[in-house]
Image (cartoon, grey):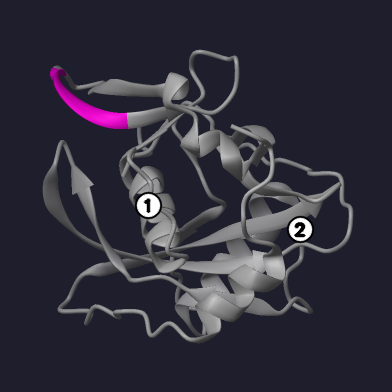
Amino acid sequence: MADRLPLTLLDIQRKLAHYTPQRLPDCDHRRAAVAMLLREQRDVAEMLLIERARNPRDPWSGQMGFPGGMLEYKDASARAAAQRETQEEIGLSLGGSSCMGRLDDLQGRHRGHVQGIIVSAFLYAVRRSFDPCPNYEVRDVVWIPMSRFFDDNRVVQVGHPLAPAERFPGIRVTDNPEQIVWGLTHRFIGSLFRVLGLDWASG
């Protein structure tokens, strides 16, 4: 597939502006938030992903994902938490950036079973260059052409680390065999493509 999507960042922003996301009630659940960062490089739409550091206390240890984390008492909102975590994890301030929109809230899962956590995702267009400064929680930061998610040759089935027999859909986003998008990140990407009206067989 060509590197270019049929949509520009402006197209994406317009579609998100007309979308009303589903917001799940707290119901005593823990809450987390992530920032989905998009940019255009030579007319190619790209998405930023992080590879999380290995940490046995992190339920998403070693996985590919978006900057983000749990809401803290000092966060005024889920969006504020996503911005704070982005600053902490990769050194990018989103305070002065325009948020393009929000996706449906998702419930966190563990081995396919719903857990007591609700995750919100906010999209930002990154229109300036910056050098990522990953903190101890982040092993790597990569920009991925969004067209790569539509490459059937990159579709894989992923075994859960605690239950390898259970398989989940995934996408190899780089030539590094460990950098596979699956789980919650995969679900959010699928949600975005559905909002944009793109047919994503991998979702």
Determine whether 25 is above or below 48 in the image.
below
Residue matched to label 2: 92
Q: Residue at x 43, y 29 (%)?
A: 171
Label 1 Cα crowd, 10 Å radius (few <14 / some 14-19 / many 20+) = some
Q: Is residue 161 magenta?
A: no
Q: Secondary structure at mark 1?
A: helix
User: Toward which corner of the image does residue 133 lie, by quadrant?
Assistant: top right
Q: Position of residue 120 (x, y in %)?
A: 40, 68
Q: Residue 91 at x, y = what percent? A: 76, 53
Marks 2, 1: nearer the viewer: 1
**Mark 2 and mark 1: Cα distance apart in space:** 25 Å
Asked whether 87 or 168 is in front, the reply is: 168
- State the residue in front, 177 or 114: 177
Residues in magenta?
165-169
The residue at 51%/24% (across/down) is 179
- Residue 58, relative to residue 69: is it above or below? above
Q: Residue at x 60, y 80 (%)?
A: 14
Q: Position of 104 compared to 42: left or right?
A: left
- Most foreground residue, 86 or 201: 201
Magenta span includes 168: yes
Taking 25 as reference, is 103 above or below it?
A: above
Does 140 sit left or right of 157 as displayed? right
Mark 2, residues whose alpha carbon is within 10 Å: few (<14), some, or many (≥20)?
A: some
The kind of residue tagged 2 is Leu
Residue under numbered circle 1: 190
